């Protein structure tokens, strides 16, 4: 079995460039994101006259071994990528997913200091599987409006075009190489100290030496 990281590497960027050159999926759906993105502005796209969309917040309770170390809170950009946010919200509650599984009790399976924390394998917990909250295993890319320009962004981890499931990245710094490939759909607004704890965790080839579990999750 290959992780999403190795699968992406095996395809390489020549595949991606070929896809762009042939105009697939409307030029890979706005592959070059604008910079910077203003998180504090009014909702970006899907606004209704006289009203504003409230961005939802969700939390991950993180445990190392048997000890709860704290919560990471995310603000989700449902005004930019509504289907992606809907998928993530559903994956925080197993009763709302087609496969009746959620992020609860899943593992953080890969950490690369200065780059990403990776999790979301709700089935095998080792990075080899991803399934959306919907009936189909994957759902399509929406857009790449928000760039990977800073620490604390959460984005979908995919293995190519339209292969979004349950796995995600949490950025530990700018990752411009992911722009136009993975959709950013939220940011960390609480628990930065917990994110720093994850980054400092001892790993072997990116795999945490001890289990790191999302022991609870839900809407904040």
Image (cartoon, grey):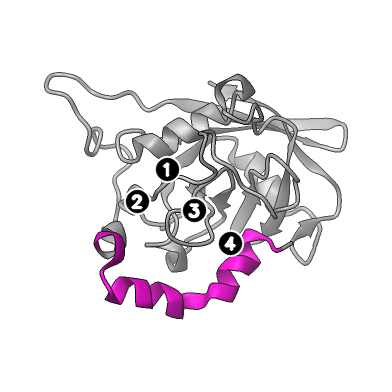
Q: Which residue is mark 4?
A: 115
Q: Which residue is mark 2?
A: 146
Does label 4 or label 3 sit earlier along the sequence? 4
- In which quadrant will I find the N terminus? bottom right
Location of residue 84 with respect to 171 vertically, above or below:
above
Q: Which residue is mark 3?
A: 163
Location of residue 55 with respect to 111 vertically, above or below:
above
Does label 2 or label 3 sit earlier along the sequence? 2
Compared across the picture, whether 101 is left or right of 81 comes to right
Distance of mark 2 from mark 3, alpha carbons? 18 Å
Outermost residue, bottom side: 14
Distance of mark 2 from mark 1, alpha carbons? 8 Å
132 or 177: nearer the eye?
A: 132
Q: Which residues are magenta?
A: 2-26
Q: Is the residue under label 3 in contact with that under label 4 (CB below 8 Å)?
A: no
Distance of mark 1 from mark 4, alpha carbons? 17 Å
């Amino acid at each position: 079995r290959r992780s999403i990281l190795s699968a992406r590497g095996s395809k390489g960027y020549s595949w991606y460039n070929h896809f762009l050159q042939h105009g697939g999926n409307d030029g890979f759906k706005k592959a070059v994101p604008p910079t910077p993105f203003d998180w504090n502005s009014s909702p970006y796209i899907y606004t209704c006259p006289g009203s504003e969309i409230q961005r939802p917040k969700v939390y991950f309770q993180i445990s190392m071994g048997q000890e709860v170390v704290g919560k990471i809170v995310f603000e989700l950009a449902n005004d930019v990528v509504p289907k992606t946010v809907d998928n993530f919200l559903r994956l925080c509650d197993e009763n709302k997913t087609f496969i009746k599984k959620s992020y609860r009790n899943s593992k953080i399976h890969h950490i690369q200091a200065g780059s990403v924390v990776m999790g979301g394998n709700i089935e095998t917990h080792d990075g080899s599987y991803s399934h959306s909250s919907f009936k189909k295993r994957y759902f399509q890319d929406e857009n790449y409006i928000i760039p990977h320009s800073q620490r604390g962004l959460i984005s979908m981890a995919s293995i190519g075009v339209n292969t979004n499931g349950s796995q995600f990245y949490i950025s530990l710094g700018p990752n411009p190489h992911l722009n136009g490939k993975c959709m950013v759909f939220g940011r960390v607004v609480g628990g930065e100290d917990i994110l720093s704890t994850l980054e400092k965790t001892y790993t072997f080839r990116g795999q945490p030496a001890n289990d790191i579990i999302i022991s609870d999750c839900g809407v904040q």
